[in-house]
Image (cartoon, grey):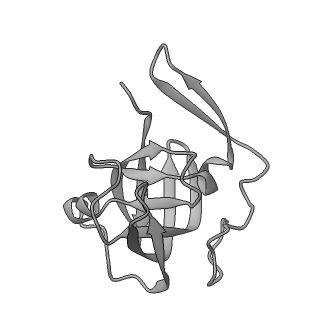
Amino acid sequence: HDLFCIRGDLAVRGVRYPGRFLYDDGYERTILLDTALVAETGYPRDQPILKKSVLRDGRGREVPVVVFNNERLDLNAVSLYNIPAQLLAAANPARFKTHILGAEVLKRFNTLLDFQHDVVYLKPNGLMDAAYADAQSGAGSK
């Protein structure tokens, strides 16, 4: 009851991988994939790497990540395509099993947080077709 998480599915090569996504508008990028959930669901790790990058945690420590194209993210009835996703090479900073849904995805929705019913409402807005900031190899929305 402390953090808002959203249920959604990642899809690669026609296979859906269900997951929980922490609503984190403080994370500037798109999706930060949890290594434990990736392993549990069998999410494919053999995708072409767009780039390698480094994040810094709250203590300033460097955390290596690889960026690759995730084919689709389904959030209820809305789908986002060709999202550059980041895969952690270390433990999840959230300290529990969850992917992190960042501002680069969240800005594409008008959001209503219903704290009384523990519900997040996402309504697509005019930024749905905007290019992703982390897209260096042609990845973007459809």
76 sits to left or right of 112: left
Q: Nearer the viewer, residue 45 or 133?
A: 133
Residue extending farthest to the front is: 59
Q: Quadrant of residue 11?
A: bottom left
Judge left or right: residue 95 versus residue 71. Answer: left
Percent of width and height locating residue 101:
49, 51
Residue appearing at x 44%, y 60% in the figure: 32
The structure residue drawn at horizontal position 45% and vertical position 22%, both measured from the top left corner, is 118
Of all residues shown, which one is farthest toward the top? 116
Residue 79, horizontal then vertical, whole percent:
57, 54
- Which residue appears at 41% of the width and 74% of the height? 65
Q: As rendered, which of 43 and 132 lies closer to the eye?
A: 132
Q: Position of residue 3 (x, y in %)?
A: 41, 33
The image shows a total of numbered marks equal to 0
Residue 89 point in image, percent of width and height: 31, 72
Q: Of all residues shown, which one is farthest toward the left?
A: 40
Q: Is residue 45 above or below residue 91?
A: below
Task: Pick whichever, 38 or 102, lies toward us.
Answer: 102
Q: Quadrant of the N terminus?
A: top left
Q: Quadrant of the C terminus?
A: bottom right
